[in-house]
Amino acid sequence: MKLALLLIAALSFAVPAFAEDYEKGPNGGLMLDVAGVDAELLTAGNTVTINVFVPNTPKPVSTKGFTAAALIASGGSRETLPLVPQGENSLKGDAKNPIAAGATITLTIKTAEGKSGQAKFKK
């Protein structure tokens, strides 16, 4: 019984954030806490932009030294795209096709300090 409770507790911390945890970001996008930063998702056409902020503030965090990727799942299609630092606090990547409404975008990110995490956004 103790093992089962321990396993459930461990899995609850390992599961990526879901829709009910969204905040509204400084630029109007969906924002989640991941890897010790706030990540704001913005999409336009086929471009995915992640803006990075100090948690619970609109203060930008430099993305120099960050690595990230986004998995876009829509219907039966899936596409993984690398996100590269751009500007002061952004990570960007371009998908092959426009990102459909209702798509799920899973962000995998590693900060310059080596913290890593994953967050799931529902567009």
Image (spheres, helix red, strand yellow):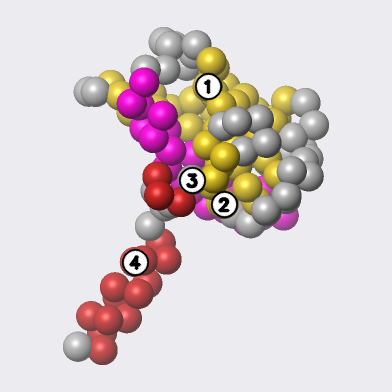
Amino acid, disc 3: Tyr
SS at mark 1 in the image: strand
Could you tell me residue 59's position as x and y percent? Answer: 78, 44
Q: Classify residue 12 by image quadrant.
A: bottom left
Could you tell me residue 10's position as x and y percent? Answer: 37, 72
Circle 1 is placed at which residue position?
43
Extent of the magenta region: 101-123
Could you tell me residue 19's position as x and y percent? Answer: 40, 45
Q: Is residue 72 left or right of residue 5?
A: right
Circle 2 is placed at which residue position?
33
Of the numbered discs 2 and 1, the one sitting upstream in the chain is: 2
- In this rendering, which labeled residue sits more in front, label 3 or label 2? 3
Check the picture and name the quadrant holding the C terminus. Answer: top left
Circle 4 is placed at which residue position?
11
Amino acid, disc 4: Leu
Q: Classify residue 68 by image quadrant.
A: top right
Asked if the residues shown at circle 4 and circle 3 are in contact, with their CB atoms under 8 angstroms apart, the answer is no
Q: Is residue 81 left or right of residue 74?
A: right
Could you tell me residue 116's position as x and y percent? Answer: 57, 53
Q: CA distance from mark 1 to mark 4?
A: 30 Å
Q: From this viewpoint, which residue is outermost toward the left?
A: 1
| Residue that appears at 50% across and 11% down | 45
Q: Is residue 111 left or right of residue 93?
A: right
SS at mark 2 in the image: strand
Asked if the residues shown at circle 1 and circle 4 are in contact, with their CB atoms under 8 angstroms apart, the answer is no
Image height check: is 17 above or below 83?
A: below
Circle 3 is placed at which residue position?
22
- In this rendering, which labeled residue sits more in front, label 1 or label 4? 1
Amino acid, disc 1: Thr
- In this rendering, which labeled residue sits more in front, label 2 or label 4? 2
* Residue 61 in view of the camera: no
What kind of secondary structure does the magenta stretch mostly adopt? strand
